[in-house]
Amino acid sequence: MTPSLALLLRDYREQVETQRLLLGKPLTDSDFVFAHPDGTPLDPSTVTHIFGRVVRKAELELRLHDLRHSYTSIMIAAGVNIKAISQSLGHANIGITLDTYGHLLPGMGRTAAERFDKLLKPWLSGENVAKTGWFRYAPRGIRTHDPRFRRPMLCPLSYRRR
């Protein structure tokens, strides 16, 4: 929850507490945030209906659920960690979030490749390759240029001379 939302909710709680005290029904910790003045929960269709009226009055075409998608899209565009977004949406696992919003992550593969390349740049310099002489020992089709990244126990033939 953002700090600004926490402030808004505190102010709202104070208003509700005042109303409830006037009705003779003090607010308890088990009460809902958004409820009727007597504390009974709002029906979800009531919330949707009120939202629809506000949206029509503003001359917009928007469903309540669209706000959830907008929130997620903005968070992804801002570079927020996808796991944090998934948790804030209440998804059971990150796979649900990625399946639903993965299309909003264009260039993620490119970004990952660029970061990986930057990380490996010192190891893949011409000087390091010349020192190791990997090309003399590696079998055809080897993908890595630096034998330090290969495990002899996984690739025993990769260190054998031809």
Image: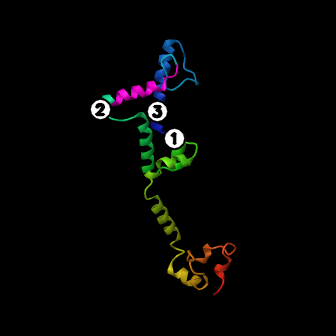
How many other residues sit within 10 Å of disc 3, few (<14), some (14-19) or many (≥20)? few
Q: Secondary structure at mark 2?
A: loop
Which residue appears at 51% of the width and 78% of the height? Answer: 125
Q: Residue furthest bottom?
A: 162
Which residue appears at 46% of the width and 58% of the height? Answer: 108
* Residues at discs 2 and 3 in contact (Cβ within 8 Å): no
| Magenta range | 40-55
What is the C-alpha distance between the residues marked 3 and 1? Answer: 21 Å
Q: Position of residue 84 (x, y in %)?
A: 53, 46
Q: Secondary structure at mark 3?
A: helix
**Prevalent SS, magenta region:** helix
> Closer to the observer: label 2 or label 3?
2
Q: Is residue 25 above or below residue 135?
A: above
How many other residues sit within 10 Å of disc 2, few (<14), some (14-19) or many (≥20)? few
Q: Is residue 43 magenta?
A: yes
Q: Which residue is mark 3?
A: 7
Name the disc covering residue 89, or none: 1
Left or right of residue 98, residue 52 in this image? left
Left or right of residue 161, residue 79 in this image? left
Q: Which residue is mark 2?
A: 59
Which residue appears at 67% of the width and 72% of the height? Answer: 154
Q: Is residue 2 above or below residue 105?
A: above
Which residue appears at 66% of the width and 73% of the height? Answer: 151
The quadrant holding residue 158 is: bottom right
- Who comes first in sequence, dot 1 or dot 2? 2
Three-letter amino acid code at the position of disc 2? Glu
Q: Is residue 59 magenta?
A: no
Q: Secondary structure at mark 1?
A: helix
What is the C-alpha distance between the residues marked 1 and 2? Answer: 28 Å
Name the disc covering residue 121, or none: none
Q: Position of residue 15 (x, y in %)?
A: 46, 22
